[in-house]
Image (cartoon, rainbow, N blue to C red):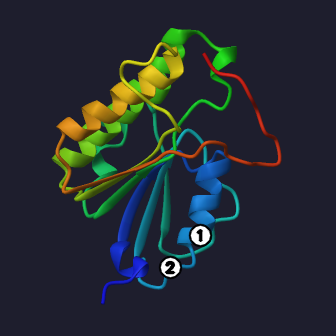
Amino acid sequence: MQTNNDLFQSVVMLGATAAVGTETVRHLEKFTNLTKLTLLGRRPLEGCTASFIHQKIIDLFTSDSYQNFLEGHQTAICTLGVGEPSKMSKEDFVRIDKEAVLDFAVARKAAGVSHFQLLASVAINPESKSFYLRTKGELVEELKALQFERLSVFQPSMILTPNNRYGHY
């Protein structure tokens, strides 16, 4: 019988320093079969002491900056996203929440990852009138088109953190 621990032997992650990403890393640190966890981000995640965690500082918008760190992972997890999309331009939101994520996914597919996991949002729809929900829905459709062996899209209605933020386009 396959357990959740068996699904994660080597993981590469984008978006580990925000609220959900940090909690995801804390959870992954407990997996007994995890032999390699590579965190890609703009800054390091403090408090990571496990020997199997490797942190790499990258430029989110240049896949060449992380290309050398992608090989040898079975699973990719992406929790990258803007915490308060209403406080930035729509163009910047798309650049971070859609384009950077899609570039990461394309690079992961090319590097042979079999399972891609994405933190999205409830009610995403590529035809939504809501800019936020439409953008997230378009992203998921483009991820489906990449035909990963397995694609997991998590759609929480609300993420509770010590500093909840509300409001999106």
User: Which quarter of the figure has residue 71?
Assistant: bottom left
Quick check: marks 2 and 1 in contact, CB under 8 Å?
yes
Q: Residue 31 shows which numbered tag?
A: 2
What residue lies at 34% left-to-right and 35% top-to-bottom? 140
Most extreme residue toward the bottom, as rendered?
1
* Label at residue 145: none
What's the amino acid at mark 2?
Phe
Between residues 71 and 154, which one lies in front from this camera angle?
154
Question: Left of 72 or right of it: where is 159?
Answer: right
Q: Quadrant of the C terminus?
A: top right
Nearer-the-camera pick, 130 or 82: 130
Residue 61 visible at all: no
Side of 117 where 142 appears, left or right: left
Q: Tell which of 161 and 8 is nearer to you.
A: 161
Identify which residue is drawn at 70% across, 64% down. Answer: 47
Q: What residue sits 43% from the left and 22% below the top?
A: 135
Q: Position of residue 138 (x, y in %)?
A: 34, 25
The answer to whether residue 65 is above or below residue 95 is below
Tag 2 secondary structure: loop
Return the residue found at the far right. Answer: 162
In the rendering, which numbered label is found on residue 27?
1
Cα distance between the residues tagged 2 and 1: 7 Å
Amino acid type, callout 1: His
